[in-house]
Structure formats: structure tokens, C-alpha cells
Image (spheres, grey):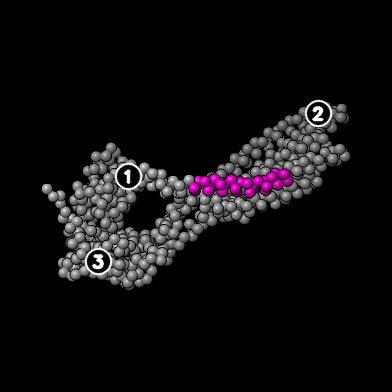
């Protein structure tokens, strides 16, 4: 249990001074809680003695006792307030910083990390796990450390007035600690299983929600709802089983403390009957016997939670310790924007996608990449942007291996426009300025005009301040594409990668997209994956990819003169683009 507490304190290391000072305030706050009862017992003892002696009770004793009680209550509130000010916000402050840090970590890991780890697992780690730590971490410190501080404060009072009662208290807490250790061990064993069940449920929920459109369109519940139901049932059963495992330890913990409370009452009663303790102090000990263990009783709930917190911290540490793809990278400015692949091989898991790929893309030229589906075209672009690292060979930018760059220093030279555009649930202005947050309003509007999206934006109810749905769901495909091009224009990077940027555009928007792309790519190094003949024909060079390697390379005219994959590709494209409805 205390091992878990050390981890929580280490997690909040930046605020350790506040944490310790808050515990000191908690101790004295607990001591001030005992003072009113002790003062009242002292005054009662004096009053009884005066009564039996036939003397009048001095009014000063009443007033002194009153002011001591009022003062100690005021002191208790002040110390409790100071502890809360110091400790309560620590969890939120640490968690806020850690979320930003985790966002930076996830930005710097290779995309293969997201294939090996499900979105549900990562989402649970960043949200549920961190929220558990954020909300419960400091409460555990308060319950366990401050709870023991309250016990020690009252125990010190016992030592002065009844050492025997103090010994019984310590014995009771010792037996209680054995039970708490059992709770903590059980929590450690079951926490990983519980968290896995929660991650499975989270993943199933995401999958079910994502597939709702398919479920509705086919009028079926689908396999996803079965997976969701099973995940919920499994989580329920695991929670019930875990709680049943806690029951014996909970009973032993509470039984030890209640038995110790009864022991204190009996020993103090025996001392009172034998004249070793006054009646007033006996009554005080009776009250204390029900108060002294109150803070310790609550620790069993904390022991339940510590296993979950340990599991959450394990998950967060695993996320934080994910290997950065640019761990050894440096902030480098390339000498030129020539891109060269030298004997590059790459595969996803155990499946080889590219092998022995060699080519050069000269600066300020346009290179089109064509080939059958699954041949590795998009993978080439992902490797240039270093979303993944090559398995063999190297890729250079301006004669420097891209593995020597940090991701930021590499990607600031590259703009990418994808076929599947993702826009954030934010204003159109912020989505465009995502490419360059410091851009002025005039620069942002100029980029929108060049991307041919200014007119439709101004027709929206709030213009550039219109908030679009998650993923850009409130816009058409062509509108989203043009906003993504405006975003890339505003970044104004010297290298532009177009990954089938016009593949799914409707005919009436196609000319607008082509105009926008022409404006975006003017005077830059262009790599484009495309199927449309107009885009391919004008390229300075065409790379034909098939079976994970470059099978042909040259201009449109040169490749047309060669028998092979490109010739077949052109025939198919001419047939596809030359179709018409027969009258």
C-alpha cells in the first residue's frame, strides 16, 4: 500500500513541498480536533471535584474552557482550509500537464504504434486512467497519510493519560493493517484484469458507434453490438467477482478496529473502577474510542482504489515510455529539397510492402507515382514524411538522412493533402490556420481564395467563424478538400505530397480542386499519387510501382513507348475516363 503511495507522491513530485506541508497541517488539524474534548473533560473533572468538595465552580474555568474550544475549532477549520488549498488541486495540475505531454508523445511515435495498440486502449489511458489518478490520487494521500496522521495525533493524547489504551489502539491498527495489506494485494492482482475489461468495453463502444451507419443501412444489429454486449457483461461479472474477493478482508479490517474500540472502553472502565482514572476522563476516552479509528476505517476504500491507481500508472508509464521515432533527431535545415530513396525496404509487421526501392526526386519538379492498389504508393509518401522508419536502406532530404531530423524540423518542410480529409471540430478559420497558427487574417483569407473556398465559406451563416462538425461532417467532400488545400497553402512548405487528393471529388467540383492544387504546387517539389491522366501526363517524371518496387521510371512519353505496367495502366484509365452514355 505504501509502495503505491510513494508512486503517487513521485507522480506529483513537482508539488511535493505542497503535499508534505499539507500533511503537516492535517496532523495539527487532527490534534486541534482532540483539544475540545480534552478541554471539556478537564473542566468536567475540575467541576466534579469542586462539587464533591462543596466548592463553587470558578467562572474563569468555564470561560477558559469555552475559549479553548472555540479557538481549537477555529484553528481546525483554518488548518483544514490550508491543507485543502495546498493539496486538493495538485491532481488536476499534474494531470493537465501530463495530458499535454502525452499528446506530444503520441505525436512523436511511429504510426505503427497505433496498429499495435488499439484506439480504445490509448483512449482509456489518456482519459479514464489519467482521470482515475487525477480525481483519486490526492484523495488517497489525504485518506491514507492524513488518516494515519489523525490517528497518531489522538494516540499522543492517549499516551499521556492511559498508556494501556494507547497499546490497545496500536494493536488494533496493526491487525487492521494486515487486512489492508490483503485488500491491497487483492487489488493489485485484479486491477489489470479490471482495466483490460474496461479497455475492451471502451474499444467495443467505439467500434459500435463507428459502425452505426452500416448497421442502420442494412437494418441489422451486426456483430459489433454482440461484442459490445459481451464486453459490458464481462466487465459487470469481473466487478462483482472482485468485490466478493474484498469482503473477507473488509470484515477483518473493521472487526479489528471495533474490537480495539471495545478494548479501550473496557480498560478505561477498569482503570476508573480502580481509581486510576477519573469519571470525566473515562467519558473522554469513551468518546475517543469511537473517533480514533474513524480515519483509519476509511483506509479500506483507499486500499481498494490503490490497485486501480497502480494499474493506471502502469498504463500511463507505458504510454510515456513509448519510443519516439525521432529520439536521436536534431533540428536540421536541409541544404536542398532533393529526395532520394536508396535501397529502401519496408514492411508492416511481418508483411513486406517495399523492397530495394531506388529513385531520386529533384528539387522543384513534379513526380507522379502510379501503380495497382496495394503496390506501396501511399507507403512511399508515409516514409518520406517519416510516419514510419525504413527497415533497410535510407531516404535523404538534401543529402541528409531523414532519420537525423526531428519530426518537427522534417515536417515543417512538407505539406500533405490526403484523399480522406480530416477537419477538427472547430471554426473554419482555426482549421485553415492549423497549417500556420501565427498567420494573419489577411494571409488566411488569401489562402482560402487561392484554394477556391472563400466564396462558399462566406455563404455560411457565420463565415469563417462557422463551427464545423467533427471530421468536417457538416461539409461536402469537395468543400473539405478545398479547406485542406487552403491549410496546406498557408503552411507554404517547399515539398507538397498529394495522396490521391482528387480521387473522390465530384465532377462539378473537380475543376475547382485542380485550380487550387495548381496554385498550391506552383514552384515546389511535388510528389503526387494520382490516377487521373491530366495530372500524370504533365509530371516531370513518373514512377511506376508494382509488387513493392519501382518497375518503370520516366516521362509520360517515354513510358508510353515501353511495353509494361504503365502502358496497361494508361489503357485502363483512357477507357474509364472516356466512357459516355449511349443515346
Of the residues under marks 1 and 3, which one precedes in the sequence? 1
In percent of width and height, residue 420 lies at: 31, 52
Residue 459 in view here: yes
Badge nearest the viewer, 1 or 2: 1
- Check the image and report above or below for 554 versus 59: below
Rendered location of residue 179, percent (x, y):
69, 50
Question: Mark 1 sits on what residue?
Answer: 473
Query: What crowding class fits label 2: few (fewer than 14 Cα within 10 Å), some (14-19), or many (20 or more)?
Result: some
Residue pictured at 22% horizontal, 43% vertical: 455
Q: Is residue 452 left or right of residue 324?
A: left
State the CA–CA distance, disc 1 to disc 2.
82 Å
Q: Is residue 192 left or right of residue 161?
A: left
Classify mark 3: residues with Cα within 10 Å, few (<14), some (14-19) or many (20+): many
Binning the other alpha carbons within 10 Å of mark 1 as few (below 14), some (14 to 19) or many (20 upward) gives some
Q: Residue at x 30, y 57 (%)?
A: 416
In percent of the image, x 51 and y 55: which residue is there?
A: 315
Query: Which residue is drawn at the image coordinates 62% and 52% (left, top)?
Result: 186
Please determine whether, in this image, residue 89 is positioned above or below residue 488. above
Q: Which residues are magenta?
A: 230-257
- Image quadrant where residue 29 sits: top right
Instruction: Measure how far apart labels 2 and 3 are at the Cα level.
Output: 107 Å
Residue 241 among those drawn in magenta: yes
Q: Nearer the viewer, residue 51 or 244?
A: 244
- Residue 296 visible to the viewer: no
**Can you tell which mark lies on residue 57?**
2
User: Where does label 3 land, which residue?
Assistant: 544
Amino acid at each position: 500500500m505504501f509502495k503505491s503511495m510513494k508512486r503517487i507522491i513521485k507522480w506529483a513530485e513537482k508539488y511535493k513541498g505542497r503535499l508534505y506541508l499539507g500533511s503537516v497541517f492535517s496532523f495539527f488539524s487532527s490534534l486541534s480536533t482532540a483539544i475540545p474534548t480534552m478541554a471539556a473533560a478537564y473542566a468536567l473533572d475540575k467541576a466534579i471535584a469542586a462539587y464533591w468538595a462543596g466548592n463553587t465552580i470558578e467562572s474563569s474555568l468555564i470561560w477558559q474552557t469555552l475559549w479553548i474550544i472555540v479557538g481549537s475549532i477555529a484553528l481546525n477549520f483554518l488548518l483544514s482550509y490550508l491543507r485543502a488549498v495546498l493539496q486538493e488541486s495538485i491532481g488536476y495540475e499534474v494531470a493537465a500537464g501530463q495530458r499535454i505531454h502525452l499528446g506530444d508523445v503520441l505525436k512523436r511515435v511511429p504510426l505503427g504504434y497505433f496498429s499495435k495498440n488499439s484506439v480504445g486502449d490509448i483512449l482509456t489511458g489518456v482519459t479514464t486512467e489519467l482521470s482515475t489518478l487525477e480525481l483519486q490520487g490526492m484523495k488517497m494521500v489525504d485518506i491514507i497519510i492524513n488518516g494515519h496522521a489523525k490517528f497518531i495525533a489522538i494516540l499522543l493524547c492517549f499516551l499521556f493519560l492511559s498508556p494501556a489504551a494507547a497499546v490497545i489502539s496500536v494493536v488494533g491498527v496493526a491487525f487492521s493493517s494486515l487486512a489492508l495489506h490483503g485488500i491491497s494485494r487483492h487489488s493489485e492482482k485484479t486491477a489489470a484484469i479490471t482495466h483490460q475489461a474496461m479497455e475492451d468495453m471502451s474499444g467495443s463502444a467505439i467500434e459500435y458507434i463507428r459502425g452505426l451507419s452500416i448497421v442502420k443501412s442494412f437494418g441489422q444489429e451486426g456483430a459489433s453490438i454482440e461484442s459490445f454486449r459481451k464486453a459490458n457483461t464481462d466487465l459487470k461479472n469481473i466487478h462483482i467477482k472482485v468485490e466478493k474477493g474484498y469482503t473477507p478482508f473488509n470484515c477483518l479490517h473493521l472487526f479489528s478496529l471495533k474490537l480495539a474500540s471495545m478494548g479501550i472502553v473496557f480498560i478505561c472502565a477498569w482503570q476508573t473502577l480502580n481509581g486510576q482514572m477519573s469519571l470525566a476522563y473515562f467519558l473522554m476516552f469513551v468518546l475517543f474510542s469511537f473517533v480514533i479509528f474513524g480515519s483509519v476505517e476509511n483506509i479500506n476504500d483507499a486500499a481498494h482504489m490503490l490497485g486501480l491507481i497502480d494499474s493506471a500508472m502502469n498504463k500511463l508509464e507505458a504510454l510515456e515510455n513509448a519510443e519516439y521515432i525521432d529520439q536521436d533527431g536534431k533540428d536540421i535545415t536541409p541544404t536542398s529539397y532533393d529526395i532520394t530513396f536508396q535501397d529502401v525496404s519496408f514492411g508492416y509487421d511481418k508483411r513486406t510492402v517495399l523492397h530495394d526501392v531506388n529513385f531520386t526526386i529533384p528539387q522543384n519538379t513534379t513526380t507522379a507515382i502510379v501503380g495497382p492498389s496495394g503496390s506501396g504508393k501511399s507507403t512511399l509518401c508515409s516514409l518520406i514524411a517519416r510516419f514510419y522508419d525504413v527497415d533497410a536502406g535510407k531516404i535523404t532530404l538534401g543529402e541528409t538522412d531523414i532519420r537525423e531530423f526531428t519530426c518537427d524540423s522534417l515536417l515543417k518542410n512538407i505539406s500533405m493533402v490526403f484523399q480522406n480529409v480530416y477537419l477538427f471540430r472547430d471554426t473554419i478559420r482555426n482549421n485553415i490556420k492549423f497549417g500556420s497558427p501565427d498567420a494573419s487574417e489577411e494571409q488566411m483569407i488569401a489562402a482560402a481564395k487561392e484554394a477556391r473556398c472563400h466564396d462558399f465559406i462566406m455563404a455560411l451563416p457565420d463565415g469563417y467563424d462557422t463551427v464545423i462538425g467533427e471530421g468536417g461532417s457538416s461539409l461536402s467532400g469537395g468543400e473539405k478538400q478545398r479547406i485542406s488545400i487552403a491549410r496546406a497553402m498557408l503552411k507554404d512548405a517547399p515539398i507538397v505530397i498529394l495522396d490521391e487528393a482528387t480521387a473522390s471529388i465530384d465532377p462539378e467540383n473537380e475543376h475547382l480542386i485542380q485550380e487550387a492544387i495548381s496554385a498550391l504546387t506552383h514552384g515546389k517539389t511535388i510528389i503526387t499519387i494520382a490516377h487521373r491522366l491530366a495530372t500524370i501526363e504533365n509530371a516531370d517524371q513518373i514512377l511506376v510501382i508494382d509488387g513493392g518496387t519501382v518497375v518503370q521510371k520516366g516521362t509520360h512519353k517515354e513510358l508510353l513507348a515501353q511495353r509494361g505496367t504503365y502502358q496497361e495502366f494508361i489503357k485502363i484509365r483512357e477507357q474509364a475516363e472516356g466512357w459516355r452514355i449511349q443515346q
